[in-house]
Image (cartoon, grey):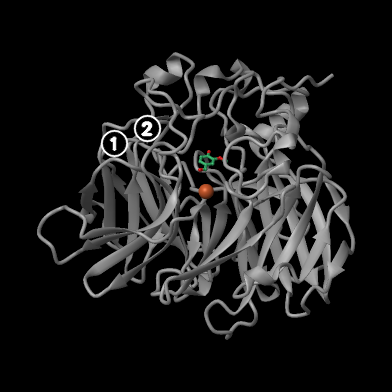
Amino acid sequence: MAHYPNTPGMTGVLRPLRIEGDILDMEVEGEIPAQLNGTFHRVHPDAQFPPMFENDQFFNGDGMVSLFHFHDGKVDFRQRYAQTDKWKAERAAGKSLFGMYRNPLTDDESVKGMIRGTANTNVMVHAGKLYAMKEDSPCLIMDPLSLETEGYTNFDGKIKNQTFSGHGKIDPVTGNFCNHGYAATGVLTDDVSYFEIDPQGNVLFETFFKVPYYCMMHDFGLTQDYVIFHIVPITGNWDRLKAGKPHFGFDKTLPVYLGVLKRGADGSDIRWFKRDNCFASHVMNAYQDGTKIHFDTCEAKGNSFPFFPDIHDDSFDPVAARPFLTRWTVDLASNGDEFTSIEKLTDWIDEFPRIDERFIGQPYRHGWGLVMDPDMPMDFLRGRASGFKMNKIGHWDLVARTEDCWWAGPESIIQEPCFVPRSADAPEGDGYIIALVDNLITNYSDLVVLDALNLPAGPIARAKLPIRIRSGLHGNWADASKLPRAA
Ligand code: V55
Ligand code: FE
């Protein structure tokens, strides 16, 4: 009999879902544009069994992958667990064997030394496979259409690093899958690797470097010639793990760094720039402008993660926690290590930034993301939503410096959006935004389709689920041409 803890992270809107299944030809309101031909994969944490520790992190749930397969104006839905080594061992035992988030000291003896990953952070198609990613473990390979798990890979031994972060990016120029892994030589280590995998799935190179201090390196920036790493003080150490504290805590006494490494160069060539303390997690995009590098990220003055509390036990500040899209600029021609400028690009509280990914690493104009507008009615609070309440999708035109949005209404919160180009050669931004919208009152989720450059017009179509999908992390579109041929 499964008894999940009676905590906000496991009850109400965050009750575990644990449903695997298929819907052939989803119920649709409106018309699915016929150009939408491909797949949208996304993932959420969903503990298969009650966690060993009542106060475990939301981020520690087993990865549950959802697939929305668009073809012929229809959408098919499929949902399966990512069958990590952890998932299989616990399935066989009928209970949890792995302990707290990123704390191997809390595991059952029977699983010591096993890969602890949950594959719950991002899913992306590359070289005909679905990469299911979690930043503390290697890449888990799944089939993009059947969602069957093949297992972990180190790419024929060519990736020496032990970890594969969740925010790998496909360079639109080379088609390479570019990613990093931190804690690369073991839990809490300050080694990081950067590597690129070609369109056929072959590792081109991997290089290692040291960071100024160990921290959660959740995302990074890619430009045509450089890779950019932000070092933000969400940090941890063995004393915390021995004391059973959360792996990470926020340290407001440490500076923030931006590392710039030439792609293909040795990791020891990385150059560090430095600024005052702040919080930043996701990166919208980065690009070169002469000798300058622009790095667009959602910056907050203070810690945005209440579940990774202040390392010196300061109380959580919900105002300082609000992130805003911000442009960090450094100049490679400068002699010092200071930033050239830090420019706030919006007054909207926003996170989960996305772009037209044909412009990754390039000068770009359009960005989208989730927005929390606290002035709109929030009937969904009756559903006990916790954390940020993302009730709008925002669009930023970074050239015209305008912004517009779509509000999901008083009952719903929104999951990370994803941009889909109208066609391979459509101009930047010409296409669709797709996103899961979770109605916390009726308890259903809809996958909405919007015109990316006309969000205020509202959804063109809603593919309707008969359940509500648990709040998740990240997902990606893959054009049908990138998928293995259906058997
Ligand atoms: C994040 C999510 C994770 C994680 C670390 O910022 C960072 C998001 C779903 O797991 O382990
Ligand atoms: Fe993320």
Residue closer to the observer: 164 or 220 = 220
Quarter placement of the C terminus: bottom right
- At 63% across and 69% down in the image, what residue appears? 455
Closest to the observer, 240 or 434: 434
Q: Amino acid at mark 1?
A: Tyr
Query: 450 and 214: which one is in front?
Result: 450
Quarter of the rendering containing residue 186: top left
Task: Name the secondary structure under disc 2.
Answer: strand
Residue 222 in sight here: yes
Looking at the image, residue 152 sits to the left or right of residue 182; the answer is right
Distance (Cα) linking label 2 and label 1: 8 Å
Crowding at label 2, few (<14), some or many (≥20) Cα neighbours within 10 Å? many
Q: Quadrant of the N terminus?
A: top right
Q: Which residue is mark 2?
A: 235
Q: Position of 396 compared to 26: left or right?
A: left
Q: Is residue 263 visible?
A: no
Residue found at the very far left of the displayed protein: 335
Q: In this figure, which residue is indicated by the disc labeled 1?
A: 213
> Image quarter for residue 317?
top left
